[in-house]
Amino acid sequence: MHTVIIVIHLMLVVALTGVVLLQKSEGGGLGIGGGGGFMSSRGTANLLTRTTAFLAAGFFATSLVLSWLAGLDRTPSSLINSTTAPATQQGGAPVAPPSSGGILDTLKQQEQQQAPAAPQAPRSQ
């Protein structure tokens, strides 16, 4: 479903770009507008204007559908309030899930477990 809508969206983008580039310039910033061309009649301008409006409406519609489909499968989640803990510690032993809080409490408990009680003097062998 996503792929079909993306292909339609891209075809609308290419067509819209082409139609906009075909339109007569109103004497724009480069100073090369005006004069007669092969598409200089007023009827062609109305056709191009209507085609641009139709393609722009299709572009907006496919954009809205794509954004709606992207948010459809998304579920809100939070790392701070999560009740799951990392799978293993450094040594490979499994970690029990926290009993009261989120990931911050888990990290605090791990830090307390890994800290030595008191400094020890080196021993000779």
Image (cartoon, rainbow, N blue to C red):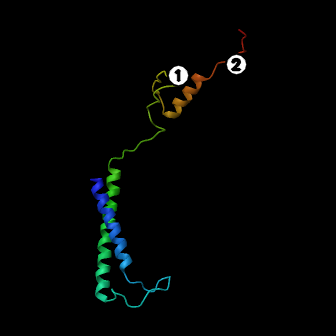
Q: Is residue 121 above or below residue 36?
A: above
Of marks 1 and 2, the one in the foreground = 1
Q: Which mark is residue 119?
A: 2
Name the amino acid, label 1.
Gly
- Name the residue rendered at 36%, 47% in the picture: 74
Crowd band around label 2 with a 10 angstrom C-alpha radius: few (<14), some (14–19), many (20+): few
Q: Quadrant of residue 42?
A: bottom left
Q: Residue at x 48, y 32 (%)?
A: 101
Question: Relative to 76, does residue 124 appear above or below in the rendering?
Answer: above
Choose top left, top right, bottom left or bottom right for residue 114: top right
Name the residue type under label 2: Pro
Disc on the earlier residue, 1 or 2? 1
Quadrant location of the C terminus in the rendered image: top right
Residue, x 35% and y 68% (percent of image)? 14
The total of numbered circles placed on residues is 2
Crowd band around label 1 with a 10 angstrom C-alpha radius: few (<14), some (14–19), many (20+): few
Q: Position of residue 17 (x, y in %)?
A: 37, 71
Q: Is residue 125 above or below residue 54?
A: above
Disc number placed over residue 91 in the picture, else none: 1
Q: Nearer the viewer, residue 108 or 49?
A: 49
Which type of secondary structure does the marked residue at label 1 adopt? loop
Q: Position of residue 64 (x, y in %)?
A: 33, 60
Near-viewer residue (89 or 98): 89
